[in-house]
Image (cartoon, helix red, strand yellow):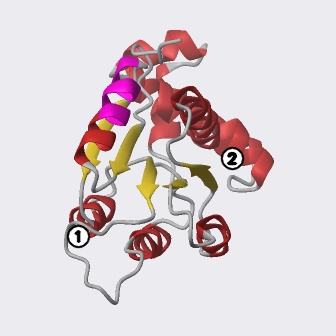
Amino acid sequence: MKADTDNPFEFTVLVVDDDDKYRTHVAEYLRDEGFQIVESNSSADACALIRKRTVSLVVLDWDLHKVDSGPEDSSTGLKILQTCREVDALLPVVVMSGEPLLDVQTDSLMAAADCFLRKPSSLPVLTFHLRHWMDRLKAEKTPFTQLAAGVIETADAVNRAYTRAVVEKVGSALKAAPKLGLSRQTVASYLASPGSS
């Protein structure tokens, strides 16, 4: 099942793994499934991408040993996960590891990872998790979900946020007014409200 490419919602997955062959295999599979993918093979590059706030979800190999990690650094995945939480506490992180000697699942979940998959994991299972998070992030961006969650506190604020979203999608208040069933003056007042962003 392909992702809806006509959907304006942008969802970019950062795949971090120092095993180039495995990372490329996962990235190609996910691209074929319709996901937008960015790849990194080091904690430094991954942290830089996360700080740019251009990724929606991180698929993280917990055991990055090849690039920019020293012998005292048993897991640079922790550094990346900490960066995720510093930059965006709600950024979903799926940790993967094939390390047999450490309890990576417990360590990563205790460090606030959202999910753990054993490597090599089933790519359809990974795809399922990514679609789940994509749907959840998409829902969290709608004014109605934000109202239910208490992010937006009034129905009027939802109406204004929805109006702004429709105007942004169609490109102008003039085109949005008939779609919303509102006058151009009402649309203009919603766009000029203090809550507009």
Q: Position of residue 113 (x, y in %)?
A: 59, 63
Q: Considering depth in this image, is 117 or 101 the residue closer to the camera?
A: 101
Residue type, mark 1 in image: Ala
Which amino acid, by three-letter code, is at mark 2? Answer: Gln
Q: Looking at the image, is mark 2 or mark 1 earlier in the sequence?
A: 1
Q: Where in the figure is residue 21, as x and y percent of width and height?
A: 26, 40
Q: Locate residue 149 relative to residue 80 in the image: left or right.
A: right
134 over 90 or under it: above or below: above
Asked which secondary structure carries label 2, the reply is helix
Q: What stretch is highlighted in magenta?
A: 25-32
Q: Nearer the viewer, residue 75 or 193?
A: 75
Which-is-in-front pick, marks 2 and 1?
1
Image-based side of 106 in relation to 92, left or right = right
**What kind of secondary structure does the magenta stretch mostly adopt?**
helix
Residue 29 is a magenta residue: yes
Near mark 2 (Cα within 10 A), the count class, few <14, some 14-19 or many ≥20, is some
Q: Distance between the residues labelled 2 and 1?
A: 34 Å
- Above or below residue 107? Residue 157 is above
Task: Give the vertical position of 74 relative to 146 (above or below).
Answer: below
Q: Residue at 24% of width from left, 56% of height from top? A: 41
Task: Using the image as rendered, state which of residue 155 and residue 35 is in the foreground.
Answer: 35
Q: In which quarter of the image is residue 180?
A: top right
Residue at the image point whose x is 65% and y is 67% from the top: 109
Which residue is labeled 2 in the image?
A: 146
SS under mark 1: helix
* Percent of width and height locating residue 164: 48, 34
Considering depth in this image, is 76 or 31 the residue closer to the camera? Answer: 76
Q: Does the magenta stretch include residue 40?
A: no
Q: Which residue is drawn at 42% across and 57% down?
A: 61
The spot of residue 13 in percent (x, y) is 39, 42
Considering every residue shown, the one lying at the far front of the view is 101
Q: Mark 1 points at which residue?
A: 44
